[in-house]
Image: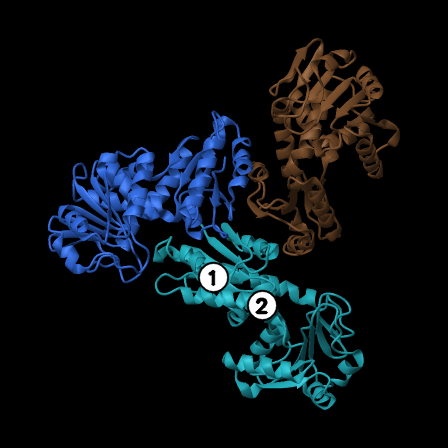
Chain colours: A brown, B cyan, C blue
């Protein structure tokens, strides 16, 4: 029985990136849907649920993507709400690679620093990747400074994460222009993640030098100027001034492996849900196999 | 040479249901087209006709679907009109499964009652499934009471069936609220089919009990309240009060087999046409093989 | 690793013709995109560039098509501009088959006449196929009369070809209603190509007879009345009055072979560009193999 992946994308043209990775992950037949609207999801999912018997449903799965994270998350929710036992198919959310990128970033950092009990500063934390990095770090028992341009947006992000079940005591909302708090975060941080938009500088070289405790710096921006001055896109565990640096391309290798393995894992049963947290497990397995 | 199915769907998003069934029917490459407009069909069909030599054309076929039956039927007509010998490919019409469902409903009823000469009452006969059930029954030499809320609509449906070649003497248009005629139909009916929209009650338990001759009752509504009070969705030949009952899910098993076998049969030659009548033949073959 | 072809089509529904040929050319997974807009191309091409490592990129390719040649050429340019070493995939342009048809027409003519030094008259030369026939002929060192209804349009076409690198001295713009020049071209022509729209007569039988030197006449119109009076669509090297004639279907056989072989050749490396000139090479190889 062929492995069918139903790609539901909220963009007008469904992602080629996600399609190619799916095919390389072993999908036999990809059904691509672009410009997917919430009101269309129920019928599409019913088509997945009712065509193969419950025992064969593990060969059908749904992938939700698109550049607008809020739209994709809504689609993802409707997919989950539409299904019920035993008519379930596995479903994955990875809009613009935000989930697999966040998991890869945290896992790479975790190779150098014990995350449990560490302190992290997440810059531009309100974006799709930043939110997920913050959530994963808090779930790994880090203390996380959630930073953005305004305190309102940082606090809104924290509130959202808490509403999703993240431990509130681990999250501290700060504004990047609030010098006292930002310096405090810089001084305490063992880990710094820059999750900003393309071409926006978030940390000067001087600020980076002032972060005396920092052991790992990760910059997920792939378009110059980078988010953290002094790092390069291709950094993949480069040591600089006693610090380990990662750039977007350096993270990309593990991200691709997680993305592909997560798609493949959808077909192991008919009830997998692949969100950022599940991709951490997928990524840990990959790293464990590589070490062996 | 790969088996290619061109899925022409009039809905904005082509049906996942039809796509999965096609893949499971042995299609190697599915080309999905949504939001198909009449003026686009000619070019699409030319692409099917002129790419492979006449001897290889049996490996290409067209499937027409969509939730709006009138639109899909128009597309189906244009597909047929565009082709000519020897540049033909097989073509199937099964909008929202109406054809395969109607064939499965009548075939299941025919397992318990000799259709030739029997009397049938079709409730909500003007909808996509109801029209097809009525047509098939009349072609099987049943006397068919074609019922709907108004006599105008019932008569319009009868006129349409007659214009399509159905024997006029076998069709009697009635209105469900016309008590005299409706009771007459109930008293005469060997078979009752409820083909209404989701969640609409068409026959009370009391009315069903007054149908003294009825041997088989089929309810194709899958959303409660069901069309016939007293039946359940999962009925698959259940005996109640000397009557055999079928619900939507009970019919679904044979419907799926017909749908899949009909798609597979498209590739047996380059000139198959699969409409409700042809699906009866496909269904009969399936039942004959199961008995053996 | 599966061969993936990304079909970027500027029409609302991507071409079935191009899809079937691609599948028959050995493509394992076709990703179809219709209604492709210039501003969407970059992201789609990035998805092709960054998903497989540089060594595997020869298994991914892009096909650009659509009935509007100017739109497709713009998409083709953006695809090429987006890529850089070593993240390249092969790319082909064949909107409505114009490139493969033009190559097949000239190659068939070249079987009967030495093109180097010959004189050709191209009727309706400003259309997609006519432009390409003119370009290829000039590159083969023919003297080419570029004819259309008005001198302005013919000259515009010549200017465009020159801007694309064609030798200016080989192109002569003429208007079909300018009797002196048109008769001169007719008298000198060794080759005549009719590249007009469906059902439009471009040359009367009388005019054809007045072309005393003509050795090959090619009519690419497949809808009667044909472009050249006296030819038929199925002519495939038919001799008439000492002249060799080809009609649209007679050219079609080689066109299909070139189209299919060109798609297959995309996967021989990750940096093929398939435009009309490259398809001449593909077509020459096909003819050489057939002779052997």
Q: In the image, is B214 to the left or to the right of B61?
A: right
| Residue at image mark 2 | B69
Camera-side residue of A82 and A281: A82
Q: Residue furthest top?
A: A241
Q: Secondary structure at mark 1?
A: helix
Q: What crowding class fits label 1: few (fewer than 14 Cα within 10 Å), some (14-19), or many (20 or more)?
A: few
Rendered residue at 68%/82% (across/down): B150
Residue C161: horizontal and vertical position, in percent?
A: 31, 38
Residue A136: horizontal and vertical position, in percent?
A: 77, 30
Up-down relation of residue A153 to residue C8 (above or below): above
Rendered residue at 49%/66% (across/down): B76
**Residue C262 makes an appearance in the image:** yes
| Residue at image mark 1 | B39
Q: Residue furthest right?
A: A169
Up-down relation of residue C230 to residue B157 (above or below): above
Q: Are marks 2 and 1 in contact (CB under 8 Å)?
A: no
Q: Secondary structure at mark 2?
A: helix
Q: Which mark is residue C124?
A: none
Task: Compare marks 2 and 1 and give the one earlier in the sequence.
Answer: 1
Q: In the image, is B267 to the left or to the right of A42?
A: left
Question: What chain is tagged by disc 2?
Answer: B
């Amino acid at each position: 029985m062929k492995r069918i992946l139903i790609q539901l994308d909220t963009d007008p043209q469904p992602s080629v990136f996600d399609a190619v990775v799916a095919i390389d992950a072993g999908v036999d037949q990809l059904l691509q849907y672009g410009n997917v609207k919430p009101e269309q999801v129920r019928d599409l999912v019913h088509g997945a649920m009712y065509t193969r018997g419950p025992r064969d449903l593990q060969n059908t799965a749904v992938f939700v993507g698109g550049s607008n994270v809020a739209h994709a998350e809504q689609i993802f929710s409707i997919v989950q709400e539409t299904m019920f036992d035993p008519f379930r198919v596995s479903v994955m959310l990875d809009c613009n690679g935000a989930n697999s990128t966040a998991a890869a970033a945290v896992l790479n950092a975790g190779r150098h620093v014990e995350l449990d009990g560490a302190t992290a500063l997440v810059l531009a934390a309100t974006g799709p990747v930043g939110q997920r990095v913050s959530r994963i770090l808090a779930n790994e028992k880090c203390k996380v400074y959630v930073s953005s341009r305004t305190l309102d947006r940082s606090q809104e992000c924290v509130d959202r994460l808490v509403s999703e079940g993240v431990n509130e005591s681990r999250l501290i909302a700060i504004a990047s222009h609030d010098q006292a708090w930002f310096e405090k975060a810089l001084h305490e941080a063992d880990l710094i993640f820059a999750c900003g938009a393309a071409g926006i500088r978030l940390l000067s070289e001087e600020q980076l030098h002032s972060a005396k405790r920092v052991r790992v710096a990760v910059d997920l921006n792939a378009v110059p100027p980078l988010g953290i001055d002094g790092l390069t896109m291709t950094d993949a565990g480069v040591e600089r001034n006693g610090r380990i640096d990662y750039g977007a391309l350096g993270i990309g290798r593990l991200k691709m492996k997680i993305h592909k393995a997560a798609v493949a894992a959808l077909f192991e049963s008919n009830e997998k849900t692949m969100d950022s947290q599940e991709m951490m497990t997928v990524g840990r397995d990959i790293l464990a196999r590589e070490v062996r």
